Amino acid sequence: MAEVRVQEGESIENALRRFKRKVQQEDIIKEVKKHSFYLKPGEKKRIKQALARKRSRKKGRRRSED
């Protein structure tokens, strides 16, 4: 769980910025979205395969640009 203590003399904006960065690093938002609704195992597999195809296409484009 992300926790940030406001240091003496630190503004709330800076503390909030540190908190957001910490939440992003710990992938808390990704986990919440993942558990917000149920996916059947087949749907989960299809999504995973689609992401893999997308990544491979992106890698292929990068190689052709170099």
Image (spheres, rainbow, N blue to C red):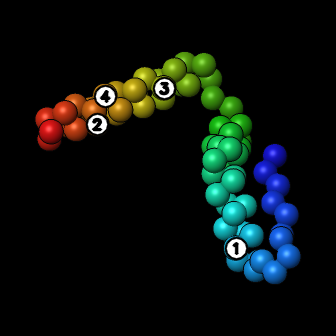
Residue at 48% over, 26% down: 48
* Callout in the foreground (2, 3): 2
Q: Is residue 33 visible?
A: no
Q: Which mark is residue 14?
A: 1
* Callout in the foreground (3, 1): 1
Alpha carbon of mark 4 to alpha carbon of mark 2: how far?
5 Å
In the rendered image, residue 13, in percent from the top left (x then y), is placed at 70, 77
Q: Which mark is residue 58?
A: 2
Q: Which mark is residue 48?
A: 3
In the rendered image, residue 59, in percent from the top left (x then y), is placed at 28, 33
Q: Quadrant of residue 5?
A: bottom right
Can you identify the residue that label 4 sits on? Answer: 56
User: Mark 1–mark 4 contact, CB under 8 Å?
Assistant: no
Label 2 vs 3, first from the N-terminus: 3
Along the horizontal axis of the image, is 5 left or right of 53?
right
Along the horizontal axis of the image, is 59 left or right of 16?
left
Q: Quadrant of the C terminus?
A: top left
54, 22: nearer the viewer: 22
Give the residue type that dot 2 points to.
Lys
User: Mark 2–mark 1 contact, CB under 8 Å?
Assistant: no
Q: Is residue 54 above or below residue 3?
A: above
Alpha carbon of mark 4 to alpha carbon of mark 3: how far?
12 Å
Give the residue type that dot 1 points to.
Asn
